[in-house]
Image: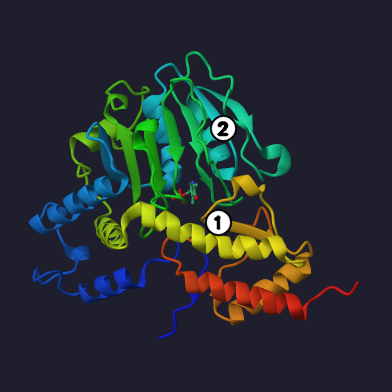
């Protein structure tokens, strides 16, 4: 068996330990004689799985009691519509556009009401996070929206925007559980789990209870109402049961590793290896303003598209998979989520150094 170092932005690397455990339990989950995939979502065994998953997530993120945790489907993208449908009481919301995902969320919100783009970093291809300390927040805004870690461009909000009292809604798909968060600073935190937590098909929503109401936009489908899912403990209909089971295992893996403070420390050490090299290399360069660099997604370029392609090809042959940058940006991107071991980054950098030596520009 040969596992590669998988630098995919998502679906992405999962802890090997979790995959092995799931394999062991595939045919007979804890004496039930069946796989979790084959099990009723109303069974005792699954009830325990989803309840433990929620309890472990609450513990990891220190989620206060006045927030609900929902396990939903439809990916992060479905939230782009679900958020305005449920939260736009005044039909006004402010969006900070720092990348493709924030832009898509903003465009979707425009369908439902007056979405204001109050800040953007599109002028410099989303390579930085704008100053959000004193933005023109709309008086009647129902919420302020951000994408906290920009998966494609590799930027991250290091300080949350000053929302001037309005609820903050954050897409954390690609930085979920990568470091401690103060949940009380948000009205809602959500993310697709396929970046840093589990298999595609699950989206986790953490939402303050007062934001969950019957007062949704007319025509909002039952399945797209937070209240329905909150009232039914995420079991209104059949949830993505197997995915939730794997997420639960990853939560336990994170707890065993010391929780989010320990993960942050590990992720910082890991990212530093790559960023330090990018800063000293004369071939490879990071594309993001230093103070806004993500710990999770690291885009870089040589400045020569042919050389970039050569690097991606040779890296793949050497066991480093999915280093090609997003199709809209080009170059390379290494996604180094929680489950990427530090050895993976060390070996990648060693490979990059070798490539640099072999391809040194004559001057
Ligand atoms: C991947 C990603 C999405 C889209 O997720 P889907 O589950 O494919 O809809 C949205 N936001 C961010 C930040 C992402 O990284």
Image check: 69 left or right of 346? left
Nearer to the camera, 145 or 87: 145
Number of numbered callouts drawn:
2
Q: Residues within 10 Å of mark 2 (few under 14, many from 20)?
A: many
Image check: 308 left or right of 67? right
Looking at the picture, the colour scheme in use is rainbow
Q: From what the image shows, is residue 184 above or below residue 113?
A: below
Q: Quadrant of residue 11?
A: bottom left
Nearer to the camera, 162 or 205: 162
Nearer to the camera, 296 or 92: 296
Instruction: Give the residue pinned by disc 1.
Output: 297
Residue at 32% in and 34% down: 207
Q: Earlier in the sequence, mark 2 or mark 1?
A: 2
Q: Which residue of the protein is positioned furthest toward the top in this rendering?
A: 139
Q: Residues within 10 Å of mark 1 (few under 14, many from 20)?
A: many
Dividing the image into 4 quarters, which one contains the N terminus? Answer: bottom left
Residue at 29% in and 27% down: 212
Instruction: Give the residue pinned by disc 2.
Output: 96
Residue at disc 2, secondary structure: strand
User: Looking at the image, can residue 196 be seen?
Assistant: no
Q: Quadrant of residue 347?
A: bottom right
Residue at 16% in and 61% down: 39
User: Looking at the image, can residue 71 be seen?
Assistant: yes
| Residue 335 image offset from top left, x and y in percent | 53, 61
Image check: 209 left or right of 303? left
Dividing the image into 4 quarters, which one contains the C terminus? Answer: bottom right
Residue at disc 1, secondary structure: strand
Q: From what the image shows, is residue 265 above or below residue 83?
A: below
| Residue 176 image offset from top left, x and y in percent | 41, 50
Q: From what the image shows, is residue 49 above or below residue 311?
A: above
Disc 1 residue lies near ligand 1 with CB under 8 A = no
């Amino acid at each position: 068996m040969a596992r590669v170092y998988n630098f995919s932005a998502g679906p992405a690397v999962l802890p090997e330990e979790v995959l092995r455990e799931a394999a062991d339990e595939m045919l007979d989950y804890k004496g039930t004689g069946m796989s979790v995939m084959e099990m009723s979502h109303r069974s005792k065994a699954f009830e325990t799985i989803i309840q433990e998953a929620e309890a472990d997530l609450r513990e990891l993120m220190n989620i206060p009691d006045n927030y609900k945790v929902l396990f939903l489907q439809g990916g992060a993208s479905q939230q782009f519509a679900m958020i305005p449908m449920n939260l736009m009481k005044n039909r006004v919301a402010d969006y900070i556009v720092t990348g493709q995902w924030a832009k898509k969320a903003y465009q979707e919100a425009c369908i439902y009401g007056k979405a204001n783009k109050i800040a953007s970093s599109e002028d410099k291809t989303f390579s930085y996070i704008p100053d959000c300390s004193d933005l023109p927040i709309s008086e009647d805004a129902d919420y302020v929206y951000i994408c906290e870690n920009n998966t494609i461009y590799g930027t991250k909000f290091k300080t949350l925007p000053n929302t001037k009292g309005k609820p903050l809604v954050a897409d954390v798909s690609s930085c979920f559980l990568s470091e401690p968060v103060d949940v009380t600073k948000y009205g809602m935190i959500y993310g697709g789990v396929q970046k840093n937590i589990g298999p595609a098909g699950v989206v986790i929503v953490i939402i303050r209870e007062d934001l969950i109401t019957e007062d949704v936009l007319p025509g909002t489908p039952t399945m797209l109402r937070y209240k329905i899912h909150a009232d039914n403990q995420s079991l209104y209909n059949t949830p993505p049961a197997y995915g939730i089971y794997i997420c639960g295992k990853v939560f336990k893996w994170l707890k065993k590793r010391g929780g989010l403070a320990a993960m942050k420390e590990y992720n910082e050490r890991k990212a530093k290896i790559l960023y330090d090299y990018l800063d000293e290399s004369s071939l490879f360069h990071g594309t993001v303003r230093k103070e806004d660099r993500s710990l999770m997604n690291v885009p870089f370029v040589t400045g020569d598209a042919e050389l970039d392609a050569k690097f991606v090809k040779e890296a793949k042959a050497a066991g480093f998979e999915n280093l090609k940058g997003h199709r809209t940006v080009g170059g390379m991107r290494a996604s180094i989520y929680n489950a990427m071991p530090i050895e993976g980054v060390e070996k990648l950098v060693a490979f990059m150094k070798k490539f640099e030596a072999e391809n040194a520009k004559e001057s």
